[in-house]
């Protein structure tokens, strides 16, 4: 028996992408940037914003993703897609 998915179902699965938030934080050991994967409890902490963005690139690999950059006051000031 062959299982066939509708094109609409395949399109929805293909569009789903990871969302990462990069935001300043008051971390320990000089870590001032938080990389948080949306809808998870996963947080990684980095010394610089550049390191946090590099980790986001590594985490997504070849999968599509969306990154939201936040200012110290919490508002999002930049958003962009990876891949």
Image (spheres, grey):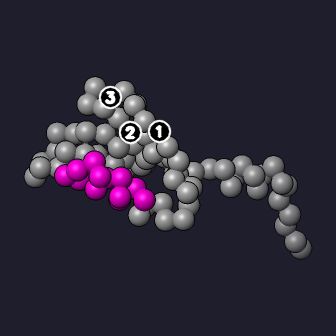
Residue 57 sits above or below residue 18 on the image? below
Residue 54 magenta-highlighted? yes
Taking the spot 40% from the left edge, 56% from the top edge, the residue there is 56
Taking the spot 35% from the left edge, 43% from the top edge, the residue there is 22
- The mark that comes first in sequence, 3 or 1, is 3
Do the numbered discs 2 and 1 sit on residues whose CB atoms are within 8 Å?
yes
Distance, label 2 to label 1, CA atoms, is 6 Å
- The mark that comes first in sequence, 2 or 3, is 2
Residue 74: numbered disc = 3
Residue 34 magenta-highlighted? no
Distance, label 2 to label 3, CA atoms, is 9 Å
Q: Report helix, strand or loop for mark 2.
A: strand
Q: How crowded is mark 2: few (under 14 residues within 10 Å), some or many (20 or more)?
A: some
Magenta region, residue range: 46-57
Please tell me whether the stretch drawn in magenta is mainly helix, strand or loop: helix
Nearer the observer, disc 2 or disc 3? 2
Is 29 placed left or right of 45 in the picture?
left
The residue tagged 1 is 79
Q: Report helix, strand or loop for mark 1.
A: strand
Seen from this angle, which residue lies furthest right? 1
Q: How crowded is mark 1: few (under 14 residues within 10 Å), some or many (20 or more)?
A: few
Q: Report helix, strand or loop for mark 3.
A: loop
Taking the spot 40% from the left edge, 31% from the top edge, the residue there is 76
Which image quadrant: the C terminus? bottom right
Residue 54 x/y as whole percent: 35, 58
| Residue 57, image quadrant | bottom left
Is 64 placed left or right of 24 in the picture?
right
Residue 18 x/y as whole percent: 52, 51
Do the numbered discs 2 and 3 sit on residues whose CB atoms are within 8 Å?
no
Residue 58 x/y as whole percent: 41, 64
Is 66 placed left or right of 69 in the picture?
right
């Amino acid at each position: 028996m062959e299982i066939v998915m509708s094109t609409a179902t395949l399109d929805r699965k293909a569009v789903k992408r990871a969302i990462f938030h990069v935001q300043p934080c008051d971390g320990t050991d000089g870590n001032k940037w938080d990389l948080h994967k949306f809808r998870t409890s996963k947080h990684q902490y980095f010394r610089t914003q550049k390191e946090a963005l590099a980790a986001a690139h590594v985490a997504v690999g070849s999968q599509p993703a969306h990154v939201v950059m936040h200012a110290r006051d919490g508002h999002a000031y930049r958003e962009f897609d990876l891949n």
